């Protein structure tokens, strides 16, 4: 084997072992804070940086290759035949080449390709430095007293003693920082309009990067990644390191007393700005990058997360473990994900479960439903029963139900209970709903004139209105005219009023575009929705719980049941949550997505799915 090729394979094998060891360390050390995880990655990348030096004194491994069997001697041919063959060879031989002929071995070609990749990646980083110079030239020093005093105070609190160039620019949408020796903190022009809490959160996040020296470590990681570019694991490690650097900066913000809900919503708004601007490619540390937002939001909303600052424990642990990388024997145990179960046929199940005797006299709706729930659990061979949800419990709550049946299916029992309480039964995939039997309202058709560009902001008319809280009963519809100048809506009078408010807001230039900037194709759930549907909660039991208590329960259970232990990001504004609302739910084996939707319905809130979070909002008619 060629010596250069051996060097390449040796470095690839050892770098792979180092990265796998770092991932294994962090997987075992689950309680480590983001700052401590940064220390482990710093140790791993320093080992990678020094790894090529080991080739200077480390003896080469001897690799036994299977040798070819010794060929038998050629048969002795008559001299006439040999002479004929020589003549033939001489005639067929090509003329000797004139000029220079380049010849490379396989190992040399491999080294050349490796070197070319390194040069390209370093050149790409150099181009990024030119972009930073342009950003610097397009910015101006901050002269706002409020912003300057806040930056000075936060720098002192963060332990940053170096001089920081605080600048502002209309060419960026989120706060940025860069510079290893002379840090630059660049704020968007809109920062002058931010409230004190938002400004402090942004400054503290970027000051965290400066305090941790992330600009220098990212520069080192860039050159190390360029050197080991054929190794995919090094790229993944660099991505993971950048992600925990952002979480470590987030931890400083949360530890300072910032409200997690408000900070998470601030990051969501910043991510929309980055996506609207077409992304950010310069080698800077932005306050938010959409690619890492989901993980960051999960960490921000996790109240039990370790947010301790940097310590030597992580660095020492990483260096000690990395020193034994060549003796590491990696083992991985893979488990197949459980197959998704088919949709629960609740109506079929309710037809099959037969109540032997049902006697109710003057029972309330809650008492009647509780009796059916108990019977369903007892009769079900798996003792899971049925999820039955009462919608609008205050609707005709004084009704009295009297029934006397023998051997009646639960589906029929629910039908009679609904009839006696002026309600109707609705079967959904994971729950049976019994709600008020309101007569359908009259549908009317109206047209709305749209402003220039309004059709482009709306996209799908019905989807846009639904995301803003407009309901569509049977027969209702919404569409755009072919020229995009009018919105045609057929709906109830009440919902038409909501549509009017939304179109007026759109004409006034207010932000009423669909809440999710990235919409999944029709009929195909987003990755977040798919994840929420895959997490099954064994039992959900609320008894007069507040909205905040219900949401917190779903957050905690989703994190406990998620194989990755990340859970789901569920956000709401305190002012949107009904003050005196209380909900009661009793569900079994229900997906988080369904439990969350039921919770939103009972609270009278709309549920919006964004790429990285579920958002509970007040409906448009509230």
Image (cartoon, grey):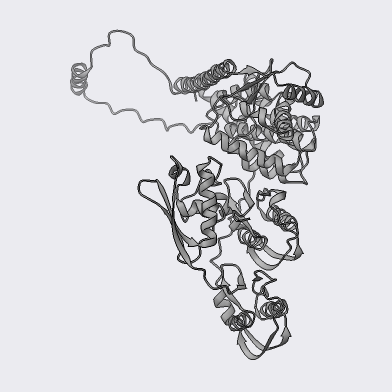
Does residue 218 lie above or below 334 as drawn?
A: above
Q: Count numbered badges in the picture.
A: 0
**Left or right: 205 as drawn, with respect to 135:** right
Residue sitting at the far top: 99
Does residue 129 lie above or below 542 as drawn?
A: above
Quick check: can you spot residue 238? Answer: yes
Which residue is pictured at 80% across the width and 38% down the height? 257
Q: Nearer the viewer, residue 378 or 436?
A: 436
- Image quarter (top left, top right, bottom left or bottom right) of the C terminus: bottom right
**Left or right: 173 as drawn, with respect to 378:** left
Q: Nearer the viewer, residue 327 or 222?
A: 222
- Residue 494 in the image, given as x and y percentages of width and height: 55, 61
Quick check: can you spot residue 54? Answer: no
Q: Which quadrant holds residue 131?
A: top right
Q: Which quadrant holds residue 391?
A: bottom right
- Residue 576 in the image, given as x and y percentages of width and height: 68, 52
- Residue 151 in the image, given as x and y percentages of width and height: 75, 24
Q: Which quadrant holds residue 542?
A: bottom right
Does residue 115 lie above or below 289 as drawn?
A: above
Q: Nearer the viewer, residue 579 or 83?
A: 579
Does residue 317 lie above or below 613 as drawn?
A: above
Which residue is pictured at 56% across the width and 23% down the height? 227
Q: Nearer the viewer, residue 185 or 378?
A: 185
Which residue is pictured at 39% across the width and 46% down the height? 484
**Left or right: 103 as drawn, with respect to 228:** left
**Left or right: 540 as drawn, with respect to 465:** right
- Residue 54 in the image, given as x and y percentages of width and height: 65, 21
């Amino acid at each position: 084997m060629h010596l250069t090729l051996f060097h390449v394979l040796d470095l690839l094998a050892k770098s792979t072992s180092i990265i796998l060891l770092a991932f294994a360390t962090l997987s075992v050390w689950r309680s480590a804070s983001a700052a401590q995880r940064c220390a482990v990655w710093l140790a791993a990348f320093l080992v990678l940086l020094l790894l090529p030096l080991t080739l200077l004194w480390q003896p080469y491994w001897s690799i036994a290759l299977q040798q070819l069997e010794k060929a038998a001697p050629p048969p002795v041919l008559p001299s006439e035949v040999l002479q004929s063959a020589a003549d033939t060879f001489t005639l067929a031989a090509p003329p000797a080449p004139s000029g220079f002929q380049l010849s490379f071995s396989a190992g040399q070609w491999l080294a050349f390709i490796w070197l070319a990749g390194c040069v390209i990646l370093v050149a790409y980083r150099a181009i990024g430095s030119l972009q930073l110079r342009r950003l610097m030239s397009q910015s101006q020093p901050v002269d706002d007293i409020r912003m300057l005093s806040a930056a000075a105070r936060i720098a002192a609190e963060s332990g940053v003693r170096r001089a920081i160039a605080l600048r502002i620019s209309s060419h960026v949408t989120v706060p940025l920082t860069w510079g290893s020796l002379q840090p630059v903190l660049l704020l968007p022009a809109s920062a002058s309009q931010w409230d004190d809490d938002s400004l402090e959160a942004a400054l503290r996040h970027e000051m965290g990067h400066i305090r941790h020296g992330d600009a220098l470590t990212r520069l080192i990681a860039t050159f190390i990644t360029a050197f080991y570019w054929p190794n995919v694991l090094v790229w993944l490690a660099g991505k993971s390191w950048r992600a925990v650097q952002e979480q470590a900066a987030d931890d400083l913000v949360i530890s300072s007393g910032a409200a997690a809900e408000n900070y998470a919503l601030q990051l969501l708004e910043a991510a929309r700005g980055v996506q609207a601007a077409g992304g950010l490619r310069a080698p800077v540390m932005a306050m938010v990058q959409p690619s890492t937002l989901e993980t960051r939001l999960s960490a921000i909303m996790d109240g039990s997360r370790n947010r301790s600052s940097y310590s030597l424990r992580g660095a020492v642990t990483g260096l000690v473990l990395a020193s034994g990388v060549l003796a590491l024997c990696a083992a991985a145990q893979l488990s197949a994900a459980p197959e998704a179960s088919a949709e629960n046929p609740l109506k079929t199940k309710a037809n099959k479960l037969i109540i032997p005797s049902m006697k109710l006299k003057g029972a309330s709706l809650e008492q009647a439903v509780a009796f059916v729930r108990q019977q369903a659990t007892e009769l079900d061979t798996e003792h899971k029963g049925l999820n039955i949800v009462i919608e609008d419990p205050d609707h005709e709550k004084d009704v009295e139900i009297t029934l006397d049946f023998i051997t009646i299916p639960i589906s029929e029992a629910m039908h009679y209970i609904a009839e006696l309480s002026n309600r109707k039964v609705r079967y959904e995939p994971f729950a049976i709903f019994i709600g008020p039997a309101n007569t359908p309202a009259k549908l009317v058709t109206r047209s709305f004139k749209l402003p220039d560009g309004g059709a482009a902001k709306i996209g799908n008319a019905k989807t846009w209105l639904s995301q803003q809280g407009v309901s569509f009963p049977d027969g209702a519809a919404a569409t755009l005219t072919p020229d995009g100048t009018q919105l045609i809506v057929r709906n109830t009078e009440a919902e038409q009023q909501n549509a009017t408010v939304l179109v007026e807001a759109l004409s006034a230039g207010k932000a009423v575009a669909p809440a999710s900037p990235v919409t999944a194709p029709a009929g195909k759930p987003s990755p977040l929705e798919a994840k929420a549907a895959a997490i099954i909660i064994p039992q959900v039991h609320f008894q007069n719980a507040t909205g905040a208590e219900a949401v917190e329960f779903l957050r905690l259970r989703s994190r406990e049941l998620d194989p990755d232990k990340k859970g789901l990001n569920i956000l709401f504004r305190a002012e949107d949550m009904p003050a005196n609302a209380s909900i009661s739910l009793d569900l079994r084996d229900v997906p988080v997505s369904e439990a969350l939707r039921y919770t939103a319905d009972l609270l009278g809130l709309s549920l919006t799915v964004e790429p990285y979070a579920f958002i509970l909002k007040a409906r448009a008619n509230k």
